[in-house]
Image (cartoon, helix red, strand yellow):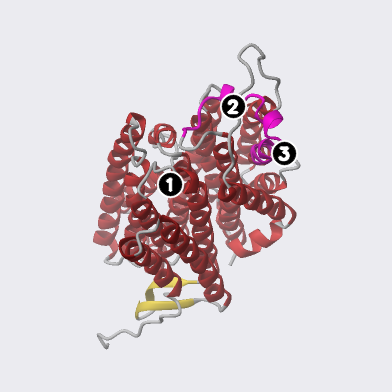
Amino acid sequence: MSAVQSVDSVALLPAYLAAGTAVLVLIIDLVVARPRATVAVAALGALGTAVGAAVVGAGGERRTFCVGGDCSWVFGGRAAVVAAVVALLTLGVLGLSVPALRAGRSPVGEYAFLLACSMTGGVVLGAAGDLITLIVALETLTLPLYVLVGLRRGSLASAEAAVTFFVVSVVATTVTLLGAALLYAVTGSLHLDRLGALLAERAELRDLPLTTAAGALLLLGLAFKVAAVPFHAWAPATYDGAPLPVAAYLSTASKLGGLVALLAVVQRALPADQTGPVLALLAVLTMTVGNLVALRQRRTVRLLAWSSVAQAGYILAPLGALALAAGRTGEARSAAYAAAVAYTVFFVVLELAAFAGVTALRPVGADGGTLDDLRGAARRHPWRGAALGLALVGLAGLPPGLAGLFAKVTVVRSLLDGGAAWLALVVALNAVIGLAYYLRVTAALWAPTATSGGAAPAVPLGGVVAVVLAVATVAAVVLGFAPQLVLDLAAR
């Protein structure tokens, strides 16, 4: 066998564009030293990455870095969707950050560079064909966020959030690497498809206690990344302490990355009969605890953080159907995987719209504040409040937020097709619980404010934030009317 491998540069084009954006941002910031130029280059790079991913993905599956039939880079339809969504989320978060960057809240060059580096990790993650590429991509997505979370100058909460996030992520990465090492010790392979084939063909390997321990460690390490209960405690404090745009990125792109990594391992590497029960338990705990604790929250970002934990439970729910024999048939498994990806796409669009709405209603550089700070906001700023209300109603799964409604219908349908009616019932009950706090916040937006304190000061709305809010809202509406398109892309 030749030691020289051919490299398919077309398959690697999205990664080239993302990494090139990070390098170019650094150069422009050093040479030109104009914040507007730096932000413009980062924005154009993110947009170019999304377009490049869509173009490459439309041409069918491409593989490179292959040894025999095992490839470390597999760029197909799903990888293209992940790369494009991560790039567009990066573009949206960069837009939300513009007012704070103009105000000097954070250094522009470093901020844009770190965001582009994180985007590069997300783009690579969707195409990872082996555990090493997967874990390195996940860490490339996560590492810049340690700094971005703590980048709000003069904020003790921001520094505490960064330390919390760093410590928990290091532990999660260690656990994930240990699981990967043990799996390699058992099978002698790190390629996902090869691992799946070996464990399916050789029952003696699958039944080893070491294999069970390796799979459990791998799953639990990745569960930290999606903030699944009981590995969720870092999320509320981190989201609340981070700058609002960074919290939006954590809740969308970072969660998407964790789900993609978890899905790759479950779908391609580990036995479904072993992972199914664990995922079912994680799904039930995550959605139930997230919703119940969200009911008691009074700070806006903490409520969104706990609701994001609950949404992670809905994302994991279709994978829980693998615990049953009926859910492990070829058709049921395909439906479960497609439902998890589709729900994630619906969720991140609505979540970005929600954070954009909060950012638009808060002063520049401020945190999310309390729910009382949003009281009557839609009366003072009608269209901003309406956009936030639409996003919250969508996350609750109610019309006119059709994207959220179809997302939950997709999950329930996949569970029923997989014979997991009991888990579908848990999802339905939790959706009802979620209505309480989503509708409470939505109602508060139009509630009359107390007159004794005078009128609340007007919050200026930057042009870029207005564009991000409008685009995210329109995207949520469009996806609500074209849910089958998302499902078809997720199933590729």
**Splitting the image into 4 quarters, where does residue 109 fall?**
bottom left
Amino acid at pointer 3: Leu
Who's the residue at 54% across and 70% down the image? 51
Kindly tell me whether residue 226 is visible in this rendering. Answer: no
Q: Nearer the viewer, residue 54 or 429?
A: 54
- Quarter of the image with the N terminus in it: bottom left
Q: Position of residue 336 (x, y in %)?
A: 58, 54
Residue 457: numbered disc:
2
Q: Secondary structure at mark 3?
A: loop
Give above or below for 254 relative to 38. above
Q: Magenta stretch: give its range.
A: 366-392
- Which residue does the numbered mark 1 point to in the structure image? 101
Give above or below for 169 relative to 273. above
Kindly tell me whether residue 54 is visible in this rendering. Answer: yes
Who's the residue at 53% across and 63% down the image? 84
Outermost residue to the top: 452
Outermost residue to the bottom: 2
Residue 42: numbered disc:
none
- Which residue does the numbered mark 3 point to in the structure image? 398
The Cα atoms of the two marked residues, 1 and 3, are separated by: 35 Å
Amino acid at pointer 1: Leu
Q: Position of residue 162 (x, y in %)?
A: 32, 38
Q: Position of residue 146 (x, y in %)?
A: 32, 45
Say whether residue 196 is left or right of residue 336. left
Q: Nearer the viewer, residue 209 or 402?
A: 402
